[in-house]
Amino acid sequence: MNQATAYANANIALVKYWGKRDHPLNIPCVSSLSMTLNDFGTTVSLSWSTSGAHETLIDGARVHAHVAMRTARYLEQLRALYPFDGFFVVSSTSNVPIASGLASSASFYAALATALNKILDLRLTVRDCSKLARVGSASAARSLFSRFAVLHGGLHCDHHDAYADSTIAHQNLDLAMVIAVVSDQPKPISSREAMVQSKATSPFFDAFVATQPKDFARAITALRDGSLETLGTIMEHSTLKMFSTMWTAQPAINYWHPHTIALINAVYELRLMLGPVVYFTMDAGPNVKILCSQTVLPDVVRFIAQKSLTQHLYVVTPGQGAYVMDAS
Ligand code: PMV
């Protein structure tokens, strides 16, 4: 096959993963639960390079050396798992701001793994392809699946049992997410480095890991039973526990911006007005993602927009998993 193009949406964790086991293939310390977003993602085209090295292009232009190196390192890890000859040109376009905690790498690696599965004719199942995506960015494994997905942390610290899967949501649970962008500037420290630092130095990291199985199990049940109140409450708790490990790392890591806190307070105000139908989460960055029921979405958007705290507001609903767009 000469070329393959795949598309993947970003996903946002409702129960967070943070920290990896000591393993070269990106095995998360904990299991996580996510929502795949609609129309918020990355297209990756793969073709064979004639230059004798992997090449990475974003919007048709060559990328900074450290980004190219990360992609090349990933492709070499895959070569070790699934031997192939030659080198790739990896060309991507995205509507997700890069490296600002908006899950751009999740959509990139999910699309890349899907395109690799095609161009190398690996014929992997979606579950096995999610392991390929996980090697690039653990959260990427979840973007293989539509709507809601889990990523298993893996019991045996092994590549084979740390895969993603879809999970069921109650049919009456009509969810939407408002992505409130406070800043789309690249973050000061990558999530990759931040989680290593949190794991190595925060006294709260072990508590985050120890309490995760209960959060994860309760959130899966809440999603299945259609309880936004339980799901949202666990989501906020999981988010704040994750950030606690960053604030108490040495040196401390702080992604938050004054507007981040103002937006959290706005969510509390919305909850007082609308009831238990609106909750927040965040990732490694200052931006706030607001999960709510679709019935209150217009009120949430209007209220947040009039606070003038954000550069952009994106409104998303549960979206489709990664897919091949074209191959020849
Ligand atoms: O996929 P990574 O390794 O970039 O880590 C992302 C981790 C969080 O977004 C902060 C949480 C999550 O579960 O997605």
Image (tube, rainbow, N blue to C red):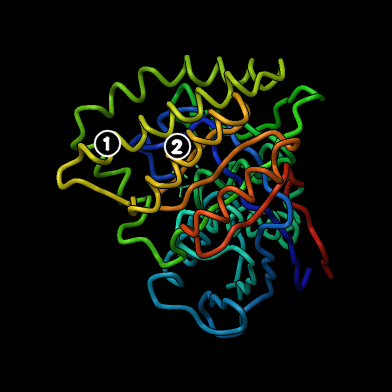
Q: Residue at x 57, y 76 (%)?
A: 58
Residue 23, given in percent of the width and then of the height, sits at: 38, 39
Residue with the most extreme left position: 250
Residue 143, given in percent of the width and then of the height, sits at: 65, 46
Density class for disc 1 (Cα within 10 Å; few <14, some 14-19, many ≥20) is: many
- Residue 27's label in the rendered image is 2
Image quarter hosting the N terminus: bottom right
The three-letter code of the residue at mark 2 reads: Ile
Residue 176, given in percent of the width and then of the height, sits at: 69, 41
- Depth check: give the residue in front, 317 or 250: 317
Image quarter hosting the C terminus: bottom right
Name the N-terminal-most of marks 1 and 2: 2
Q: Quadrant of residue 134?
A: top right
Residue 154, given in percent of the width and then of the height, sits at: 49, 27
Q: Residue at x 29, y 34 (%)?
A: 244
Q: Which residue is mark 1?
A: 199
Q: Residue at x 45, y 23 (%)?
A: 156
